Image: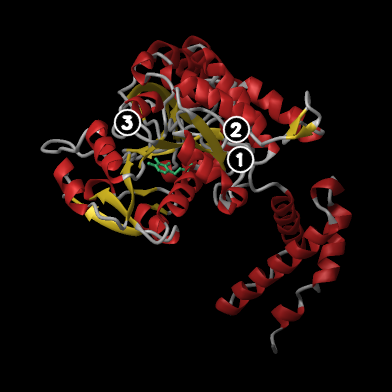
C-alpha cells in the first residue's frame, strides 16, 4: 500500500521484541503469546488506518502497552475465578454448584496422585468405577441400583439409547422442554435413535392419552420435569402411579428425568417443593435421572437410579463407557453425597444448600458489610435494597428467594458502563442491571470477602472508562 502511515508500522517480530524487553514480568507474557498479540494489535491498527484515511498511526508507547495488555489477556486462563453478584445460585454459565470443602479436599487429593478408581484394594483386584458414589445413591434414595455418567443429558441419552433405540418414546406435549445450553428434549431423543410420540396438550395430559399411544413399538414412557418453566392454572398430568401401572402392563420401563433432583425436602430450607428422587421412585418410576451439579450441590455428573435390571442394562452398554466420569468427579461426588447422611449436615456442609437456605437477615448483614466496605470510594453512591434472587439450574422454576442487593451508581456514568467495568477487573464482578441500576446480590457473595469486593469496585472506578480493562 502506498501510504506512509503503513510504512511507519513496525514488523511483528520487531514489535514483539520491544514488548518483551518492556515486560515487567516475563511470566505473564511468554514469547509465543507476545508474538501473537503483536500480530493482532498490528492487524487491528492496520484495519483502523484503512477505515479512516485521516487517522495517524498509534504512538509507539501506546502500541507497546496494547501488545503487553493483549499478551497478558491471552496468558490468563479463560476459565478464571469470578465474583458472582447475580444472585443466581446455580448459574450454568458460572459453573453451577460451588463444591463443599470435603469435596474440594477429595478432589485435590485424587488429582495429584493415584486412587482406587477401579480397584478393590481389599481383594487386590480390578473393580468398578464410582462404586462408592453408587452405594451412597442407593442408600440415600432407596433405589435398587445406581449408575453415574457425565451429566444429566448423558444420563437421559444413555437411558433412551439403550432402552428405546429404534423404538418409540411417549412424552407429554407439556414436557417437551428446552433447557438452557442447547438441551432440547426432542433432539436428544432423536440422537438416541428413538422416535418421539407426543401425547396430550401443552397444559393437559391424561393417563388415557398415554394408554392410547401404547403399542409394541414403544420402548419406554418418559416423564420430564419441566425444569425452567411452570404450567400454571388449568393444567393436569397423570400421577406417577398411573404411568407406572401403564408401563408395567406394557412390559416397558417408566423413566423420569427430574433435572435437578433434590435428595432432601426443599421446603425444609424455606424453598418451594421440588420432587425428591426418593418420592419419584416410591411413586413408581423405574429409572430416575438427574444432575450432580444442580440442587444436589456436587460436581457435574449424571445420576441414574432405579430398578436393578434396567440399571444393569445401561451399565453393560458400550455407550456407558463413552459417557463415564473421571476420578476427579468420582472424588467430589462421593464426598458430596456423604454429606447427605444427615439432612442437617448437608445444609451445613454444602454451599449450594447454604446459599439457597440463607435467611434474609443474614443476607442483609452481608449486603451491609459490602456497602460499608464500599462507603469510602469517591464518586460512588451505594445503598442496600431488598430484592429477589433466582435458584437457576432449572430448579424450582418461578421460585423467588427474598434477598438483599447492593445498588451501585458511579457519578456521571451509566449503569451499563459501570457493569462492564466491574466485569473487566480481576477477579471480574458479575453484576446485573435492573431499572438502569447496577445490582450486586449478597446471596451469591455470601462467602466472599467484602474487602475483596471493595478492591474490585475501586479498581473499576479508576482508570480509563473508554477502555474497559484499563
Ligand atoms: C438440567 C436438566 C437436564 C440436563 O442436565 P445436565 O446435567 O445439564 O446435562 C436434563 N433434564 C432436565 C429436566 C434438566 O433440568
* Rendering coords of residue 239 (x, y %): 22, 33
| 22 on left or right of 107 | right
- Camera-side residue: 246 or 152? 246
The label on residue 70 is: none
Q: Is residue 344 above or below residue 3?
A: above
Task: Answer yes or no: is residue 418 visible.
Answer: no
Mark 2 to mark 3 CA distance (whole Å): 51 Å
The reply to whether dot 2 and dot 1 touch (C-beta < 8 Å) is yes
Secondary structure, mark 3, is loop
Secondary structure, mark 2, is helix
| 454 on left or right of 393 | right
Mark 3 to mark 1 CA distance (whole Å): 51 Å
Mark 2 to mark 1 CA distance (whole Å): 6 Å
In the figure, residue 258 lies in which quadrant? top left
Residue at image point 81% right, 34% down: 114
* Dot 3 alpha-carbon crowd within 10 angstroms: few under 14, some 14 to 19, many 20 or more: many
Task: Answer yes or no: is residue 287 visible.
Answer: yes
Query: Residue at label 3?
Result: 284
* Rendering coords of residue 58 (x, y %): 69, 66
N-terminal-most mark, 3 or 1 = 3
Residue at image point 48% right, 34% down: 308
Query: Residue at label 1?
Result: 425
Query: Residue at label 2?
Result: 456
N-terminal-most mark, 2 or 1 = 1
The reply to whether dot 3 and dot 1 touch (C-beta < 8 Å) is no
Amino acid at each position: 500500500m502506498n501510504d506512509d502511515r503503513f510504512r511507519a508500522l513496525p514488523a511483528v517480530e520487531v514489535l514483539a521484541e520491544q514488548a518483551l524487553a518492556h515486560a515487567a514480568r516475563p511470566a505473564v507474557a511468554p514469547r509465543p503469546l507476545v508474538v501473537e498479540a503483536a500480530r493482532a494489535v498490528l492487524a487491528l491498527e492496520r484495519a483502523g488506518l484503512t477505515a479512516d484515511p485521516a487517522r495517524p498511526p498509534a504512538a509507539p508507547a501506546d502500541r507497546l502497552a496494547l501488545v503487553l495488555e493483549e499478551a497478558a489477556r491471552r496468558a490468563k486462563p479463560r476459565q478464571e475465578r469470578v465474583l458472582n453478584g447475580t444472585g443466581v445460585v446455580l448459574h450454568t454459565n458460572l459453573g453451577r454448584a460451588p463444591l463443599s470443602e470435603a469435596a474440594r479436599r477429595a478432589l485435590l487429593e485424587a488429582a495429584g496422585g493415584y486412587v482406587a478408581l477401579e480397584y478393590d484394594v481389599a481383594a487386590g483386584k480390578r473393580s468398578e468405577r464410582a462404586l462408592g458414589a453408587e452405594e451412597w445413591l442407593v442408600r440415600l434414595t432407596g433405589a435398587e441400583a445406581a449408575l453415574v455418567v457425565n451429566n444429566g443429558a448423558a444420563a437421559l441419552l444413555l437411558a433412551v439409547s439403550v432402552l428405546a433405540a429404534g423404538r418409540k418414546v411417549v412424552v407429554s406435549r407439556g414436557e417437551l422442554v428446552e433447557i438452557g445450553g442447547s438441551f432440547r428434549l426432542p433432539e436428544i431423543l432423536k440422537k438416541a435413535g428413538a422416535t418421539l410420540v407426543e401425547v396430550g396438550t401443552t397444559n393437559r395430559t391424561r393417563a388415557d392419552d398415554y394408554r392410547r399411544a401404547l403399542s409394541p413399538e414403544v420402548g419406554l414412557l418418559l416423564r420430564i420435569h419441566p425444569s425452567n418453566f411452570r404450567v400454571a392454572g388449568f393444567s393436569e398430568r397423570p400421577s406417577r402411579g398411573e404411568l407406572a401401572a401403564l408401563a408395567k402392563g406394557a412390559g416397558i420401563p417408566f423413566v423420569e428425568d427430574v433435572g435437578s433432583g433434590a435428595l432432601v425436602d426443599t421446603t425444609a430450607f424455606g424453598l418451594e417443593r421440588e420432587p425428591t428422587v426418593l418420592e419419584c421412585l416410591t411413586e413408581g418410576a423405574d429409572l430416575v435421572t438427574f444432575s450432580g451439579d444442580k440442587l444436589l450441590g456436587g460436581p457435574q455428573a449424571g445420576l441414574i437410579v432405579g430398578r436393578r435390571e434396567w440399571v444393569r442394562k445401561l451399565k453393560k452398554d458400550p455407550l456407558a463407557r463413552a459417557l463415564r466420569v473421571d476420578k476427579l468427579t468420582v472424588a467430589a461426588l462421593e464426598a458430596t453425597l456423604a454429606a447427605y447422611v444427615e439432612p442437617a449436615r448437608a445444609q451445613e456442609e454444602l454451599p449450594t444448600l447454604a446459599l439457597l437456605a440463607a435467611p434474609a437477615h443474614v443476607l442483609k448483614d452481608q449486603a451491609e458489610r459490602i456497602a460499608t466496605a464500599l462507603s469510602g470510594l469517591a464518586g460512588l453512591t451505594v445503598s442496600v435494597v431488598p430484592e429477589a434472587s433466582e435458584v437457576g439450574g432449572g430448579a424450582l422454576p418461578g421460585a423467588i428467594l427474598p434477598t438483599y442487593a447492593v445498588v451501585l451508581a458511579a457519578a456521571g456514568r451509566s449503569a451499563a458502563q459501570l457493569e462492564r467495568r466491574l466485569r473487566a477487573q480481576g477477579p471480574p464482578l458479575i453484576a446485573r442491571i435492573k431499572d438502569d441500576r447496577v445490582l450486586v446480590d449478597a446471596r451469591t457473595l455470601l462467602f466472599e470477602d467484602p474487602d475483596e469486593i471493595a478492591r474490585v469496585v475501586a479498581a473499576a472506578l479508576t482508570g480509563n472508562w473508554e477502555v474497559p480493562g484499563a
